[in-house]
Image: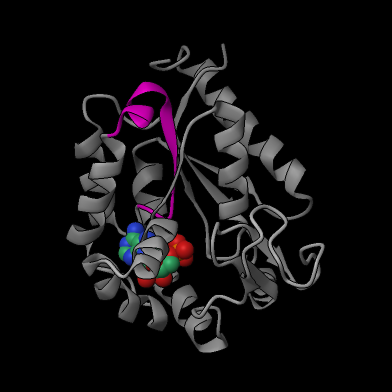
Amino acid sequence: MVPGARLVVLGKQGAGKGTQCVRLSHHYVVPHVSTGDMLRSAVKEGTPLGRKAKVHMDRGELLGDDLIMEMVAERLNESDVRARGFILDGCPRTVEQAKALAEILAPVDLDLVVDIEVPTAEVLQRLAARRVCVDCGANYSTMKPPMVNWTCDVCGGEVVQREDDTEAAISLRLELYERQTAPLIEWYRARGQLEAVDGSGDPDEVTQRMVAAVESRRDRHGGGPW
Ligand code: AMP
C-alpha cells in the first residue's frame, strides 16, 4: 500500500505550488488542502466567510490568522485527512499560523515542509501568463491553454485570469511573501523540518525532486508515523 503523507508546500505565488500539490496528492493518495481554493469557493458561494475574504483577496492582502486557522483546523479534522494525511497548500503563511498548525496536528507533527525555489523574475513571467478554471481551479497558461476556446479540459468551466493576478496585486503578494512568509522558511529550517527543492524546469522533474526529498527524509527518520 502507498504510504500517506503530512506535508506543507511553500513557495512564492507562481512557483508551481498548486500544480505540484495536486501531483503530490495523487502520488501519496491524500487530499490536497488549499486555503486559496477553499476561500475562492466560499467567495463563489457567497458565504459570510467568502464575503469577508473577497475584499482582502482582490487586493492581494492576507486574511487574519485566526480566521484562516479556524477554517484549516476544521478541514484537518475530517476523516479523509485523519486517515492518510494531507498536502497543505497556501498555509501556513506566517509564523503565527505555523505555530497554530503544530498545535492542531499535535501529537503527530508534519513529515516535512518542502520549499519550492524559483527566481522572482521567472515567477513574475509565469503569473502574468497564468489562467485558471473558475469552477474547478485547474491551472492553464497563455502558453498552455485548454484545448477548446478557454473552456476547462477537466470540467468545462470558463478559464480566466484570476482577479488578483493583476500586476499591482502580484507585486504586493510577492512583497508580502518576502516580508511575512519568508521568515517561516527560517522557522521551519531551525526546527529541522524543511527541505528546499529547485522548482525551475520541467514540472515532472520538479515532482520527482519533491518525492525524492520526502522519501529521503522518511529513510532518515525510520519511516515516520506511516
Ligand atoms: P492563494 O491561492 O494561495 O494565492 O491565495 C489567494 C488569497 O487567499 C491570498 O492572496 C490571501 O488573500 C488569501 N489566503 C489564502 N491562504 C491564506 C493564508 N494562509 N493566510 C492568509 N490569507 C490567505
Locate residue 72 relative to residue 34 in the image: left or right. Answer: left
Q: Residue at the location (23% across, 46% down)?
A: 99
Q: Is residue 218 above or below residue 126?
A: above
Q: Quadrant of residue 211?
A: top right
Identify which residue is drawn at 82% across, 62% down: 147
Pick whichever, 141 or 157, lies toward us.
157
Measuring from the top left, give residue 40's x and y in whole percent. 41, 65
Tell me, yes or no, if residue 182 can be seen here.
no
Classify 219 as above or below 199: above
Count of marks overlaid on the render: 0
* Magenta residue span: 78-91
The reply, left or right, for residue 170 in relation to residue 74 is right
For the N terminus, the quadrant is top right
Residue at 62% in and 51% down: 19
Task: Where is residue 85? Give x, y as percent.
Answer: 40, 29
User: Is 38 in the magenta?
Assistant: no
Judge whether residue 16 can be spotted in this image: yes
Magenta-drawn stretch contains 83: yes
Q: Quadrant of the C terminus?
A: top left
Outermost bottom residue: 168
Quarter of image, res 56: bottom left
